[in-house]
Image: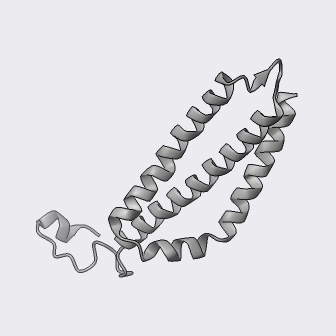
């Protein structure tokens, strides 16, 4: 029974992630206005903190008797579903913050890095 419960939760988490992906442009647009330190904090907490939250929550569910026999209890199944949704949301937010950090570091020029570079050795002059 636990595999069926896990697959149902997984399907909901994937669907939620897919719907967040469709809204990622507006999320990144909102993050572009944020300060660099806020983006670093959101990215780090979103990615690392959500993983710690997930592991601690699943441990807590198990310790509180949420797993009975070969299945989750109803309250534990609901809690697991909600914890997973929080995890997915924080992962998407953290990834979007990191993407905006990388995008602001990119150069706006399309020129190659080696263009207009002056050769300093005879080997560089003779190279094709």
Colour scheme in use? one colour
Q: How many marks?
A: 0
Q: Residue at x 67, y 30 (%)?
A: 61
- Dividing the picture into quadrants, the one containing residue 32 is bottom left
Reply above or below: 85 against 116: above
> Would residue 109 appear left or right of 11 to someone viewing this image?
left
Front residue of 18/105: it is: 18
Reply above or below: 51 against 28: above
The N terminus: image quadrant: top right
Q: Residue at x 67, y 64 (%)?
A: 20
Q: Residue at x 50, y 57 (%)?
A: 94
Residue 121 percent coordinates (x, y): 11, 65
Residue 4 percent coordinates (x, y): 87, 34
Residue 90 percent coordinates (x, y): 56, 54
Reply above or below: 52 against 125: above
Residue 50 percent coordinates (x, y): 54, 45
Q: Residue at x 40, y 72 (%)?
A: 34
The C terminus: image quadrant: bottom left
> Would residue 74 appear left or right of 111 to someone viewing this image?
right
């Amino acid at each position: 029974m636990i595999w069926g419960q896990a697959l149902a939760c997984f399907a909901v988490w994937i669907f939620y992630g897919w719907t967040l992906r469709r809204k990622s442009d507006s999320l990144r647009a909102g993050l572009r206005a944020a300060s660099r330190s806020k983006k670093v904090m959101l990215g780090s907490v979103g990615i690392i903190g959500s993983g710690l939250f997930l592991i601690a929550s699943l441990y807590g569910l198990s310790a509180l008797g949420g797993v009975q026999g070969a299945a989750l209890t109803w309250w534990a199944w609901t809690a697991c579903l909600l914890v997973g949704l929080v995890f997915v949301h924080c992962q998407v937010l953290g990834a979007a913050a990191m993407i905006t950090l990388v995008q602001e570091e990119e150069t706006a020029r399309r020129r190659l890095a080696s263009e207009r570079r002056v050769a300093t050795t005879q080997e560089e002059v003779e190279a094709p």
